[in-house]
Amino acid sequence: CCMHVGSLTKFKKTAFLFFFIQKKKPWEQDDLLKLLDAIKGNLPEKDLAKYKTSESHLDWEKVAFNSYSGEMCKQKWQEVSREIRKFRTLTELIVDAQDYVKNPYKGKKLKKHPDFPKKPLTPYFRFFMEKRAKYAKLHPEMSNLDLTKILSKKYKELPDRKKEKYVKDFLREKETFMLRMMKFRQDHPDLLENVNKKSNVPEKPKTPQQLWYFHEKKAFLKARPDATTKDIKDSVGKQWPQLSDKKRIKWITKSLEQKKLYEEKMREFIQQHPEMNMTEENIVKSTLTKAERQLKDKFDGRPDKPPSNGYSMFCAELMSSMKDVPSTERMVMCSQRWKLLKQSEKDAYQKRCEQKKKEYEVEMNRYLLSISEEEQQRILSEQKMGSFKKGEDKGKLPETPKTAQDIWQQSVIGDYLARFKNDRVKAQKAMEATWNTMEKKEKIMWIKKAAEDQKRYERELSEMRSPAPVVTPGKKMKFDGEPKKPPSNGYQKFSQEMLSNGELNHLPMKERMGEIGGRWQRLPQKEKDRYKRLAEEKQRQYKVLLEQWLASLSSQERATYKEYNSLVSHKFGSTQYCSLTCQNRLELYTIRCFSNQCLYFVCKMVIFNHLRRNQIFKFGSSVTLPACSSVRLRFFLKHFCRNGGAQQNQVAPLLKRNPRPNNR
C-alpha cells in the first residue's frame, strides 16, 4: 500500500510537469489558423454585437480541437487578441461608406426606397383617419391616447353594413399594392436578393399551442379581416387553457409529428453542411411542456403512479372531496382525520396501497411493450433521473443547527397561527415577544435541545469529512446481491410496518419508537399472533432466497461470507470466533482485500475478545478506536498478532503510528 502511495505521488508530479510543459509549448501556425477557423465557425450568422459580448457568449468546448482544451483555446485567443487593434481607421470606414452609397436600401431600409410601394391602410385606420379631425375638434381637451381609445370603441360598435365600405376600399388598394410590388421586384432584383435569401436550416417545430393559435388566427381573420393583433390575442389567446383534453391531444400529436420530420431534416442538414459546425445538440429536444407530455402519456395508456404508502393514499382520496378547503388547511385536516381512524382501517389502506403498487408494475411493463424503443428509453431515463434526484441530496452538508428560539417556535407555531388566523407575520412577532419575556428556567429545556442539535450537526459534519467513518460494531457489512433479512419476530414486523406507512414521521426517532412500543403493548393478542405468523412466513421465504444466493457464489466468496457471519454472531453468544488464534484471524481476513469499514470492525472485535479473555474488562464494555486509514489498520493487526496482543492503553498510539515512518 505504501509503495502504491509513493507511486501515486510520483504520477501526480509527472502529470503536473507534463501539463506545465504542454502549457508553455508554443503553438504552431497551422494550429493557430485552425483555432481562428473554429472561433469563426462558432459565431452566429448575424454577428452584430460588440466583440467582447460575442467572446463572452462563445462555447469554448466547441472550439476545442486535437489536444487543445477549451480553456487553452480561450487563453491563446486572448493572447492573440491583445496584439490586434480594436478600433477602425478612416480608410476602413470609407470602404463601408462606399458600400452604403452603392446600396443605401439594404436590409430593413428597403422600405425607404422611393419606388417601394406604400402599403394600404387597414379598414380600422381608414375609419380612424376619417373621424380623427372631427373628434379632435369636438374634444380639444382630450389627448391622442384618449381619442384613439374612443375611436377604437366606436369602430367596434359599427354595424357590418357601415364597415363594409372601409373593407372594400382596403381590398381594392391591396390588389394595387400587390401589382406594384411585383413590378418593384422586376425593376430592382439586386435589392431583394438579400431579403429573399432564406437560411437552408430547417424550420423549428411549433409547440401544440402555437399550431392551434395559428389555425384559430386564420379562421378569425377570415371572419374579421379588419381585426388587429390585439383583437386576435384577446379573443383567441385565452381559449387554449379552456380546451378539453381530447381537443388538446389533437395538437399535441401534430406537434410531435412535426418534430419527427424536423429531426430527420436536421440530421440530413448536419451531414450535408459540416462547415456549419452543428451537432445533434442543436436539434430542438422537445416541443411539449411537462403537463402536455403527461397528458399524451396518459392518452397512450401509461398508468398513473400509485401513492407511496397508506397515509398518502388516504390523503389523496380525501383531498378530492376538499376542493373548497384552502390548500394550507388540507394537510392538517388529513392528518387529524388519519389519527381518528382505527388501526384495522389504516392497515386496510396500506394493503390497498401495496396491491396498487403490484398492479402498477404489471401495467407499466405492458405499456412499455406497446410503445416504440425511443419512447421506452425516454420513460426509463425519466425514472432514473427521478431516483437520482432523490439520492443526490445525500452528498449535501448536514442541516444547520437550530437555536433554542427556533426549536421553541417550531413547537408552538401551530397554536399561534390558529390564534392569528394563519397570519404568519403577526404570529412570528407574537412568538418573538413571548420568547423575549420568558424566564431563563422556562428556556432551559429548549437550550438543551439546541445543544443536542449542535452536537448532531458537528457529528454529521465530522462523519462527512472523515476519510474513515467510525463503524458501529453491531452493524453488518452488506454483500452484493445478499437478500435483505426480514423481521425476526412479530414486534419487529409491526415496527417495520409502522415506520414505513409514514404516520409517525412528524415525531423524532426516539419518540417514534416509544409510540410504536406503546401501541404494541395495547394490541390484542390475536393481532400479535398475526404479526408473528407474518414474520415466520417472511423468514421461511428469506431462507430459500439465501440458499439460492449462496449457491450462486464462488467457493472462496462463500467461505468468506460464512466466516464473517460467525464473527458477527459473537454478539449473540457464539464462542466460535473466540477459539481462533490471532494468526488464524489474520489469515482469515487477508483472504481478500477488505474495505476500511470491514477492517475497522475486525480490529475492534480482535481487541474486544483479547481484553475479555484476559479479564481486563467484563462483557458488555466497549472498545473505541480513532478514525484511521486501511494501511494503519492492517499495520495494527500485524503488530497485534506478532506480539500476542496489546494493552487497552496501547491501542490508540499503535493506530496513530505511521506504517512507514520515512514515507509521509
Image: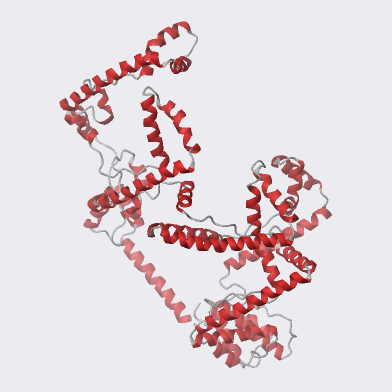
- Regarding residue 380, the answer to whether it shows in the image is no
- Regarding residue 178, the answer to whether it shows in the image is yes
Q: Position of residue 614 (x, y in %)?
A: 71, 91
Indicate the quadrant where residue 494 lies: bottom right
Residue 440 placement, left or right of 597: right
Residue at left offset 59%, top offset 63%:
355
Residue 183 placement, left or right of 403: left
Q: Residue extending furthest top?
A: 138
Note whether 625 is above or below 23 in the view shown.
below
91 and 482: which one is in front? 482
Residue 432 placement, left or right of 23: right
Note whether 352 is above or below 175 in the view shown.
below
Residue at left offset 46%, top offset 43%:
246
Q: Position of residue 254 (x, y in %)?
A: 37, 44
Q: Position of residue 636 (x, y in %)?
A: 58, 84
Indicate the quadrant where residue 504 lies: bottom right
Note whether 221 is above or below 22 in the view shown.
above
Residue 407 placement, left or right of 631: right
Q: Position of residue 382 (x, y in %)?
A: 47, 57
